[in-house]
Amino acid sequence: MGELTLAVNGIELCVETFGSPADPPILLVGGMSASMDYWEDDFCRALAAGRRFVIRYDHRDTGRSTTWPPGEPGYTGRDMIADIPALLDAFGLDKAHIFGISMGGAMAQCAAVLHPERVETLILDETSPAFDGVPDLPPIGEELADFFAKAATTTVPDPDDHEALVSMLVEDQQAFVPEGFDEARMRAVIERVVRRTPDMRPSFANHQAMSDGEPIEATLADIAAPTLVIHGTRDPLFPIGHAEILARDIPDATLLVLDGVGHEPPPPYTWDMVIPAILDHTRQ
């Protein structure tokens, strides 16, 4: 099925699906500033080939979904979490398997405690505990911290300069993948991101600028959904200790470790391990 624009929560979200609606649904929830394009087509098709109905979507202020002026998001993190059950409503789904990466993984954790009846299982990839009070989380890697400091003083290219935007985003992605970075593959993904996005400026600014919204009083132990944690050993943003804490503190969670993988969606060379693990997990 091609792209659809759905009216949810007073806004419009652009979505795309793979597979049959008769199959168990998996909702893919992307990371900060990320449109649905970072969930690669072949990855979605592989899940669909395993008899899953795969739904990916552009967050607010990404891709072809509703945007706000740069630096002025008209929503909170709590509103973005509310988009998860709203999308299920739009598809007429009572519940789904929720697969979140990075910020999307935090959103998925929150959805699991706010709307437990809507979450069949959780898959948490390259993410960190979403709730306060978790001690001993490993810090960000020094090289990535240096990159962030430098990026804070870097001028964003003109929104009409397609090639400059692509080059900047490729460099950004490389900072999150310390080894084995596939520049050609990532450039192709980002070319699509920039081509599909009318104005990249809200994507750069607004997720970082939004407030959390109403606090969520919960702990990892409050997550009842069966949970699969996937994490790379070379993630410089959330070192592997974040995943170990998730797997330890979420009841009956399991951990799949990807050797050498950074802060990124599972790269193709891991799919022969990741896809079967996801299909097995979502048979529950």
Image: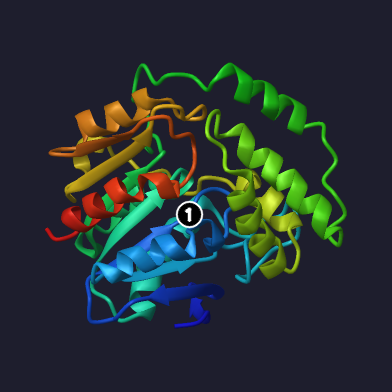
Position of residue 215 relative to residue 248, above or below, is below
Residue 55 locus on image (x, y percent): 39, 70
Identified at 54% across, 20% down, the residue is 141
Identified at 62% across, 41% down, the residue is 173
The residue identified by callout 1 is: 30
- Image side of residue 74 versus residue 273, left or right: right
Observer able to see residue 86: no
Position of residue 20 relative to residue 33, above or below, is below
Position of residue 91 relative to residue 111, above or below, is below
Observer able to see residue 255: yes
- Image side of residue 70 versus residue 214, left or right: right
Residue 178 locus on image (x, y percent): 55, 28
Q: Quadrant of residue 90?
A: bottom left
Position of residue 234 relative to residue 56, above or below, is above
Q: Which amino acid does label 1 sit on?
A: Gly
- Image side of residue 7 versus residue 92, left or right: right
Residue 270 locus on image (x, y percent): 36, 44
